[in-house]
């Protein structure tokens, strides 16, 4: 197995990665920031530019106006994290804090407090994704997609994400399972028509799209969807699944859950303890999902 390059930033949390706080002296920190890098300074707003690779493209006008009103009254309390613009040494590029930068312009501020860090392109993207995940207004699917990016792009494990984000590992695994749902259900989740609880219940449904449409039309609770998802499955199919699941040990079931979460697709493991042989089955919903799976597996 190829060993990935160890990254210390995520494991120490977002604040430590951006050097907003002092980190415990647990040993050598080759990436640690100097005291000068940790000290906020002020920069003219017109010398600060947004990151063109910022994962978050949508900013609510209402939320920006509310933040601008707060900034007019109290100023910008938390400094932006910036780096020297790699394309123009006269400017700085935002690593974290684009909303504050936009709202500050609405509030007609001329300078902003910043902390300047020498991040490379990979670190900039990583911090941007983490900052977006930690925002309270992300829906469950956006949060799951953020975790997926961190795993795919940087090789982080669910355990590392759980530690860095202050979440349980099961929370991250359950959210990532939502990425296996059909696109139409994901659209309902993004629009707020379904909750994450509804979506999780639909994962086991025989006809998840039809059940989701009925749930939205009738205003069903999560419990309603759970009950109908179980009752809608064909009896023979339920018996087969129940029989197969009962034969699997807890480790196999946990591994199925991990693989399903990591791939964003339902995974089944059938293992023969006597011979040591078995097979892994991955279910995809369409050719686009199959192509995505092939690309993931090809990357090793």
Image (cartoon, helix red, strand yellow):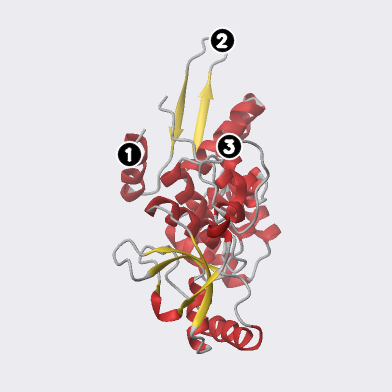
Name the residue furthest top.
275
Horizontally, is 258 left or right of 117 in the view? right
Q: Nearer the viewer, residue 105 or 268?
A: 105
Q: CA distance from mark 2 to mark 1?
A: 31 Å
Closer to viewer: mark 3 or mark 2: 3
Q: Earlier in the sequence, mark 2 or mark 1?
A: 2
Q: Residue at x 57, y 64 (%)?
A: 139
Q: Is residue 274 visible?
A: yes
Q: Does residue 150 sit above or below 254 in this rendering?
A: below
Q: Earlier in the sequence, mark 3 or mark 1?
A: 3
Q: Does residue 199 sit above or below 25 in this rendering?
A: below
Secondary structure of the residue carrying numbered label 3: loop
Q: Residue at x 66, y 54 (%)?
A: 226
**Residue at the spot of label 2:** 274
Question: Where residue 133 sits: x, y (%)?
Answer: 55, 59
**Residue at the spot of label 1:** 294
Q: Residue at x 60, y 52 (%)?
A: 16
Image quarter of the N terminus: top left
Question: Where residue 283 sits: x, y (%)?
Answer: 43, 40
Q: CA distance from mark 3 to mark 2?
A: 48 Å
Numbered-mark total: 3
Q: Nearer the viewer, residue 277 or 229?
A: 277
Secondary structure of the residue carrying numbered label 1: helix
Q: CA distance from mark 3 to mark 1?
A: 39 Å
Q: Is residue 180 visible?
A: no
Q: Does residue 30 sit above or below 203 in this rendering?
A: above
Image quarter of the C terminus: top left
**Residue at the spot of label 3:** 28
């Amino acid at each position: 197995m190829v060993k990935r390059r160890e990254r210390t930033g995520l494991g120490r949390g977002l604040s430590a990665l951006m050097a907003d706080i002092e980190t415990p002296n647990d040993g050598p920190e080759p990436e640690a920031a100097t005291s000068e890098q940790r000290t906020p300074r002020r920069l003219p707003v017109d010398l600060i530019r947004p990151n063109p690779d910022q994962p978050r493209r949508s900013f609510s006008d209402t939320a920006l106006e509310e933040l601008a009103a707060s900034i007019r009254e109290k100023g910008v309390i938390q400094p932006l994290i910036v780096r020297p613009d790699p394309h123009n040494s006269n400017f700085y590029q935002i690593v974290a804090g684009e909303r504050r930068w936009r709202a500050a312009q609405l509030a007609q501020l001329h300078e902003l407090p910043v902390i300047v860090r020498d991040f490379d392109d990979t670190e900039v993207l990583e911090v941007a994704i983490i900052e977006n995940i930690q925002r309270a207004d992300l829906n469950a699917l956006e949060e799951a997609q953020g975790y997926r990016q961190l795993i795919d792009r940087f090789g982080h494990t669910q355990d590392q994400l759980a530690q860095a984000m202050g979440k349980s590992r099961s929370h991250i695994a359950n959210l990532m399972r939502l990425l296996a749902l059909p696109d139409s259900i994901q659209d309902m989740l993004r629009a707020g028509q379904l909750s994450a609880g509804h979506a999780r219940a639909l994962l086991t449904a025989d006809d998840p799209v039809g059940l989701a449409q009925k749930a939205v039309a009738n205003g069903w609770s999560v419990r309603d969807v759970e009950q109908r998802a179980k009752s809608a499955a064909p009896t023979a199919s339920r018996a087969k699944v129940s029989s197969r699941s009962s034969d699997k040990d807890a480790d196999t079931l946990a591994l199925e859950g991990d693989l399903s979460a990591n791939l964003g697709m339902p995974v089944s493991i059938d293992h023969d303890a006597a011979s040591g042989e078995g097979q892994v089955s991955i279910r995809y919903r369409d050719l686009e999902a199959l192509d995505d799976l092939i690309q993931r597996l090809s990357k090793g």
